[in-house]
Amino acid sequence: MPEALLYLLTVATYLGLSAYFRPGGPACCGPTGWGRLLLFVPLALHLYLLDEVILPGAGLSLGFGTSFSAVAALTVLFYGLAAWHYPLAGMQSFVLMFGAFGVLLQAVMPGGRVLPDAGMPLFKVHMLAAFAAYGLFAVAALHAALIAIAEKHLHRPVPTRMVAGLPPLLTLEKLLFRMVELGFLILTLTLLSGIFFSESIYGRAFPLTHMTVFGIASWAIYAALLSGRRIYGWRGRTAIFWTLAGFVTLLLSYVGVKFVLEVLLGRA
């Protein structure tokens, strides 16, 4: 199958399923087992396209488009796995649209320079952990947005179908903090492992690059959120704000830097 047709098929499948599971639609908030399996169809195509671009031979090539696409694919993957055990059905349409957008960016901007130390297995594990943190925090950010919508409609006499079948807000918030805790652990390991590769990539053991600054800032935001939850019992809008702020900062740490360098400045 031609590559362009495969990209088109992947995007069309993502968007078709997104429309099928749209908020307020008949399949929105109660997908059955086969309904949960459907999102893995475009995801399998998505991962195949990523493998073709990111791993050309023994190297590791990551540009802005492929980086964002990898984050989107892992977001779909984490959501697909979590939806089997937790009440996340209201997010399905948005997650699928996010996946489609990632594939589109990869199709438009597939290139990227080969990273130093790309052949080292530990470096690939480091990069996989970094994108895993991105994907998990992306799901947490979407979940926080869902909680915000649920709170907005809490006192309305007839809630929208998107939130009508959701569990209590306290249950949703507990799930949110479980995701943040796991993401924080992965992010911590990513930052620590990154120190081992900084010297060979940048010539210094701990360079203060934009990537490093935003990465540490996002770690500090999530650390503050978890500490505030434990000490002060933060919840509701406070938890939502800190979750979204941490994700935006984390997004800027790598994908945002790649966007500025490749798209705005025209540098690889």
Image (tube, helix red, strand yellow):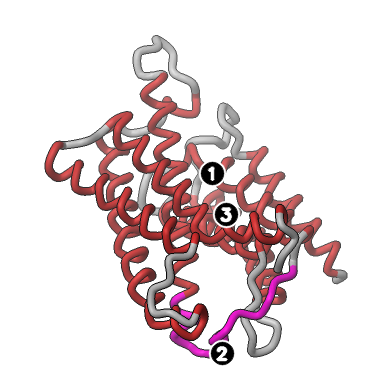
Quadrant including the C terminus: bottom right
Q: Which residue is mark 2?
A: 119
Badge 3 crowding class, 10 Å Cα cut-off, few under 14, some 14 to 19, many 20 or more, is many
163 lies above or below 2: above
**Kind of residue at badge 2:** Gly
Q: Main secondary structure of the magenta part?
A: loop
Image spot of residue 259 (x, y percent): 64, 56
Start-end of magenta stretch: 111-126
Residue lying at 50% horizontally and 78% vertically, measured from the top left: 202
Residue lying at 42% horizontally and 41% vertically, measured from the top left: 244
The answer to the question of whether label 1 and label 2 lie on touching residues, with beta carbons closer than 8 A, is no
Q: Which mark is residue 150?
A: none
Q: Which mark is residue 92?
A: 1
40 lies above or below 140: below
Instruction: Compare residues 76 and 249 and report the one nearer the observer.
Output: 249
The residues tagged by marks 3 and 2 sit, at their Cα atoms, a distance apart of 25 Å
Image spot of residue 239 (x, y percent): 30, 37
Q: Quadrant of residue 108?
A: bottom right
**Kind of residue at badge 1:** Gln
Say if the magenta span includes residue 109.
no
Residue lying at 60% horizontally and 39% vertically, measured from the top left: 21
Q: Earlier in the sequence, mark 3 or mark 1?
A: 1
Q: Is residue 74 left or right of residue 10?
A: left
Query: Helix, strand, or loop for circle 2?
Result: loop
Residue lying at 63% horizontally and 45% vertically, measured from the top left: 97
Badge 2 crowding class, 10 Å Cα cut-off, few under 14, some 14 to 19, many 20 or more, is some
Image spot of residue 253 (x, y percent): 49, 58
Q: Which mark is residue 256?
A: 3
In the image, farthest residue toward the top = 157
